[in-house]
Amino acid sequence: MIYLFLVLSVGINVIGGWIVFRLVRNALGYSENIYYLIDRLYDFRDHLKALEAMDVYHGDETIEAFVKHAADVCEEIEGFKEKHILEIEELEYAKEEENEA
């Protein structure tokens, strides 16, 4: 009887470990996607700053509103990054640990 419980316990632990491994791997994939998105947004922000410095669009209210809105979105995303960067760094550390093992 005790062997049945032992086998059952080992089986549950193996399944639980496999599920945790899959979840961590998926989370690391998300962190890579987030970093890619942040890099693309930095490129967009730089492009936006260059556009803002140009005098060509001044006077056109639609373009000015677009530039202002895009700058606001970049600021919100920067705030998101600052809020969640610790979580992303923790996931990267876990990925490095996984690669070393």
Image (spheres, grey):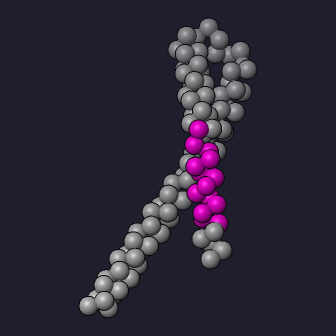
Report the residue at 59% width, 38% height from top.
Answer: 83
| Residue 98 location (% of width, % of height) | 59, 71
Q: Where is residue 2, by image quadrant? A: bottom left
Q: Where is residue 59, by image quadrant? A: top right
Residue 41 appears in view? no
Q: Is residue 1 magenta?
A: no
Q: Is residue 34 above or below residue 51?
A: below
Q: Is residue 5 above or below residue 46?
A: below
Quarter containing the N terminus:
bottom left
Report the residue at 45% width, 67% height from top.
Answer: 20
| Residue 85 location (% of width, % of height) | 62, 45
Quarter containing the C terminus:
bottom right
Q: Is residue 3 above or below residue 18?
A: below
Compare residues 59 and 24 and report the one nearer the observer.
24
Q: Where is residue 70, by image quadrant? A: top right
Work out which residue is located at the far left of the displayed protein and give it.
1
Residue 3 appears in view? yes
Magenta span: helix, strand or loop, mainly?
helix
Compare residues 3 and 92 and report the one nearer the observer.
3
Which range is magenta? Answer: 83-96
| Residue 11 location (% of width, % of height) | 35, 81
Work out which residue is located at the far top of the displayed protein and give it.
59
Q: Is residue 23 above or below residue 86?
A: below
Compare residues 78 and 2 and report the one nearer the observer.
2
Count of marks, rendered view: 0
Report the residue at 35% width, 77% height from top.
Answer: 12
| Residue 71 location (% of width, % of height) | 60, 25
Report the residue at 47% width, 69% height from top.
Answer: 21
